[in-house]
Image: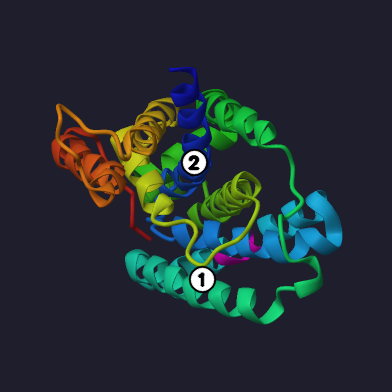
């Protein structure tokens, strides 16, 4: 049970960090399915930079890469008014192809091996502290209330003197920072970068945010639930259930199956921010 608990925390951490990144953009009215690409870009940048610049340099460069992708999403959706979903899908495609190219082209063979990084417990602490900080931020600060106002009704927010474009800029800036940390955590946990190593975690984080009703603490709980099922499938692979041997592929699909079932059961019951996707 202890190993299952520890594995749950480890597998939940990148989901929590990415979900909090999704919160700061989606709660401000920007649909963001580009979390996957931001995490992937950060992971690749960290893996390339850490051998030369150390853990701190790798973390900062990873965050910078994710911030660039996030602010590109802001530029495309807020300035050029391109559909948010199309922009997010395009960014994910760019990140998938771009990281594959950069990893093959720029990996230093002399430094190939385990990537130097921060201890994973640092990321675990951040994963549980950041949702609490965001919960307090949106409830107790003027900036947080503006974020909620813009996500609920940007037109009324303008009448009150709030600039939605400015609020969304800082929201997506925070998204880049948080997804950047999530991407770096993946490399810290595995020790290496592999092609498409996010493996859908950005989408699961977004699903957890939706299941949590676009609220930090319930989204944290949803991420822990997804992490638990991921840990469970790792623990049970190769173990017969009621005398039946289940293929490893079915166990690997368990977290994604749970995501689909959960969304199907709870999506209509959650209140979507009214300003989501609106200019």
Name the spot of residue 32 as percent of width and height, x first. Answer: 41, 56
Could you tell me which residue is drawn at 32 percent across and 44 percent down?
207
Name the spot of residue 268 as percent of width and height, x first. Answer: 15, 39
The local crowd at label 1, few if under 14, some if 14 to 19, many if 20 or more residues have their Cα within 10 Å, is: many
Quarter of the image that includes the C terminus: bottom left
Q: Secondary structure at mark 1?
A: helix
Give whichever of 253, 155 is nearer the camera: 253
Q: Is residue 194 left or right of residue 209?
A: right
Give whichever of 231, 102 is nearer the camera: 231
Q: Quadrant of residue 100 in the image?
A: bottom right
**Residue 50 in magenta stretch:** no
Give, as a single range, the part of the protein colored magenta: 65-69
Q: Secondary structure at mark 2?
A: helix
Quarter of the image that includes the N terminus: top left
Q: Is residue 204 left or right of residue 53?
A: left
**Residue 63 appears anywhere in the view:** yes
Give whichever of 275, 97 is nearer the camera: 97
Q: Is residue 66 left or right of residue 202?
A: right
Could you tell me which residue is drawn at 76 percent across and 73 percent down?
108
Name the spot of residue 257 as percent of width and height, x first. Answer: 22, 45
Label annotation for residue 147? 2
Colour scheme in the image?
rainbow
Q: Is residue 168 left or right of residue 84?
A: right
Could you tell me which residue is drawn at 43 percent across and 45 percent down?
150
Q: Quadrant of residue 278 in the image?
A: bottom left
Give the residue at mark 1. 95
């Amino acid at each position: 049970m202890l190993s299952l608990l520890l594995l749950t925390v480890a597998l939940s951490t990148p989901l929590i960090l990415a979900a909090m990144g999704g919160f700061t953009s989606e709660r401000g009215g920007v649909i963001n399915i580009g979390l996957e690409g931001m995490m992937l870009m950060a992971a690749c940048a960290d893996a390339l930079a850490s051998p030369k610049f150390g853990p701190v340099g790798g973390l900062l460069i990873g965050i910078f890469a994710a911030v660039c992708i996030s602010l590109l999403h802001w530029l495309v959706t807020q300035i050029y008014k391109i559909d948010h979903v199309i922009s997010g899908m395009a960014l994910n495609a760019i990140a998938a192809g771009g990281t594959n190219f950069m990893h093959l082209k720029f990996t230093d063979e002399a430094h190939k091996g385990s990537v130097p990084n921060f201890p994973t417990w640092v990321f675990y602490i951040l994963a549980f502290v950041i949702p609490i900080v965001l919960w307090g931020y949106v409830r107790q600060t003027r900036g947080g209330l503006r974020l909620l106002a813009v996500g609920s009704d940007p037109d009324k927010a303008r009448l009150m003197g709030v600039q939605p474009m400015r609020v969304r800029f800082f929201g997506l800036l925070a998204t880049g920072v948080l997804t950047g940390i999530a991407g770096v955590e993946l490399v810290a946990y595995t020790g290496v970068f592999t092609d498409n190593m996010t493996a859908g975690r950005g989408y699961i984080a977004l699903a957890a945010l939706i299941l949590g009703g676009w609220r930090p603490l319930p989204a944290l709980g949803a991420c822990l639930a997804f992490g638990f099922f991921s840990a469970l499938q790792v623990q049970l692979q190769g173990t017969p259930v009621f005398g039946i041997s289940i293929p490893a592929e079915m166990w690997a699909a368990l977290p994604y199956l749970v995501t689909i079932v959960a969304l199907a059961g709870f999506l209509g019951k959650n209140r979507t921010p009214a300003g989501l996707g609106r200019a």
